[in-house]
């Protein structure tokens, strides 16, 4: 993959560079030719004007063609031009080329006269009167292009060609360097992804620089870390569940073995003990079911502004009979105005149910449970306070973790498996909120649910 991508990239860069160089060369060639021709034209016209002025001056001095004849021959051979002078009637007075070919350099003019530039025709003036005309044709050139101009043009073309080739070479080197760098980083990403695919989730991408590929590398690393964390969590959960299942199972097994071996008699007391353990297993399975449901519901969370006053009122009324069974008093403290929170009605009801059930479990008969509602700058807060056994400070940080129980032996009697508060936290966080707790052993606990305002 690396090679083909690198080759494609290099090829694309080279094609682009060569294409641009060609276009640039063509345009600059056209511009050079056009400007240079304009320059040659100006030079030629300048020279023609000088010739014409010289001839006009000579004519005005003597008003005879004699001096013009001599001067034309002289000027023609020095300027390399065929100069023909005609009188006002169009009769040829002098043609410099004839004289030039008979002179010392006759052979030279013979050879160059084949190549001739454009012919320019001018009137010959004496004051304001037209006394004749002059035709000038430069020899040894094609149009405006003299041999020297052609040589100059070729030299420019050659240097442009060399520059173009050097630029193309530089483009190849630069493109392959860039392609190598780019695909090198991609290769690192691919290698890491392949390692993850083969189960080496602890492998990481070496991130270098801060470009898009580096950002992708960092994101992939973060994703791998998340997967590793999830894996660890799953392993812990499986371990915790099997541990939770093993304890009651072992107890049941020991009772049954004792009955079989005649060590214990299956009387009412022993059978009740076995029954309690099976009940514990049952409630554990139920808790696990609830955990799975919480995971499922989290995905279906439907947030909308909820009027909390009514919702709390209804929930408290629903739970009142349960609390009364244990002679617990439940209070509801609501503010006068209706308070809205951005939440999911069903999830919030489950959260309240779990918190009030805990207050019920961990508050001795005759105690009180208070549900209250308030609002802060950015959040709504629902608090469930009890006058129960409380929790020692060292347990508070772990309370919302799965399977965490303050006193496993005591809570075992209540049937708790340490899942309720974990569910509470997950559901609240799914609604974009957070949870907190304060507690004093022997005096009671207060659980807080903070929810975002609509
Ligand atoms: P459980 O099913 O064991 O109650 P939770 O996750 O609901 O599991 O609670 C975790 C632990 O926190 C409990 O085992 C208990 O020790 C403690 N706890 C929870 N709520 C209260 C409360 N209102 N008062 C005192 N302790 C509590």
Image: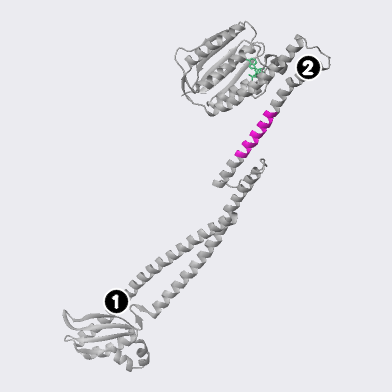
| Mark 2 residue's CB less than 8 Å from ligand 1 | no
- Is residue 224 a member of the stretch shown in magenta? yes
Residue depicted at x 27% and y 87%: 72
Task: Locate residue 249: give its quadrant.
Answer: top right
Reading the image, the residue beneath label 1 is 45
Reading the image, the residue beneath label 2 is 255
At which x and y percent is residue 57? 23, 83
Describe the colour scheme in one phrase: one colour
Vertical arrangement, residue 31 with respect to residue 290, above or below:
below
Task: Locate residue 419: give its quadrant.
Answer: top right
Vertical arrangement, residue 34 with respect to residue 242, above or below:
below
Tell me which secondary structure the magenta stretch mostly adopts. Answer: helix
Residue range (magenta)? 223-238
At which x and y percent is residue 402? 65, 24
Q: Quadrant of ligand 1?
A: top right
At which x and y percent is residue 246? 73, 23
Vertical arrangement, residue 431 with respect to residue 109, above or below:
above
Vertical arrangement, residue 188 with respect to residue 335, above or below:
below
């Amino acid at each position: 993959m690396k090679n083909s991508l690198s080759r494609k990239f290099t090829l694309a860069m080279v094609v682009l560079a060569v294409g641009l160089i060609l276009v640039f060369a063509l345009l600059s060639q056209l511009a050079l030719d056009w400007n240079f021709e304009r320059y040659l034209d100006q030079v030629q016209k300048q020279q023609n004007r000088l010739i014409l002025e010289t001839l006009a001056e000579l004519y005005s001095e003597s008003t005879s063609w004699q001096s013009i004849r001599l001067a034309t021959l002289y000027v023609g051979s020095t300027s390399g031009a065929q100069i023909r002078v005609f009188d006002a009637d169009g009769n040829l007075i002098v043609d410099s080329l004839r004289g030039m070919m008979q002179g010392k350099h006759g052979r030279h003019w013979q050879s160059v006269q084949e190549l001739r530039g454009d012919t320019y025709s001018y009137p010959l003036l004496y004051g304001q009167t037209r006394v004749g005309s002059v035709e000038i044709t430069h020899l040894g050139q094609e149009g405006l292009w003299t041999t020297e101009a052609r040589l100059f043009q070729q030299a420019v073309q050659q240097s442009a060609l060399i520059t173009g080739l050097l630029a193309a070479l530089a483009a190849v080197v630069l493109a392959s360097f860039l392609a190598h760098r780019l695909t090198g980083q991609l290769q690192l990403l691919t290698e890491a992804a392949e390692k993850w695919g083969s189960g080496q989730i602890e492998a990481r991408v070496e991130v270098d620089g801060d470009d898009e590929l580096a950002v992708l590398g960092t994101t992939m690393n973060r994703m791998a870390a998340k997967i590793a964390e999830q894996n660890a969590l799953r392993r812990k959960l499986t371990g915790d569940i099997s541990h939770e299942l093993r304890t009651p199972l072992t107890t049941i097994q020991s009772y049954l073995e004792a009955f079989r071996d005649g060590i214990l008699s299956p009387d009412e007391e022993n059978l009740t003990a076995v029954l309690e353990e099976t009940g514990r297993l049952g409630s554990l399975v139920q808790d696990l079911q609830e955990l799975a449901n919480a995971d499922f519901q989290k995905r279906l969370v439907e947030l909308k502004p909820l009027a909390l006053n009514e919702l709390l009122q209804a929930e408290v009324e629903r739970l009142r009979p349960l609390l009364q069974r244990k002679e617990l008093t439940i209070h509801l403290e609501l503010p006068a105005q209706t308070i809205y929170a951005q939440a999911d009605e069903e999830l919030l009801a489950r959260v309240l149910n779990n918190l009030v059930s805990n207050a019920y479990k961990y508050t001795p008969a005759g105690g009180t449970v208070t549900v209250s509602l308030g609002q802060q700058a950015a959040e709504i807060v629902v608090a469930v306070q009890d006058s129960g056994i409380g929790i020692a400070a060292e347990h508070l940080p772990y309370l919302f973790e799965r399977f965490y129980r303050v006193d496993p032996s005591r809570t075992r009697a209540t049937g708790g498996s340490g899942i309720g508060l974990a569910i509470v936290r997950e559901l609240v966080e799914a609604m974009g909120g957070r949870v907190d707790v304060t507690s004093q052993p022997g005096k009671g606990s207060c659980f807080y649910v903070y929810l975002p305002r609509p």
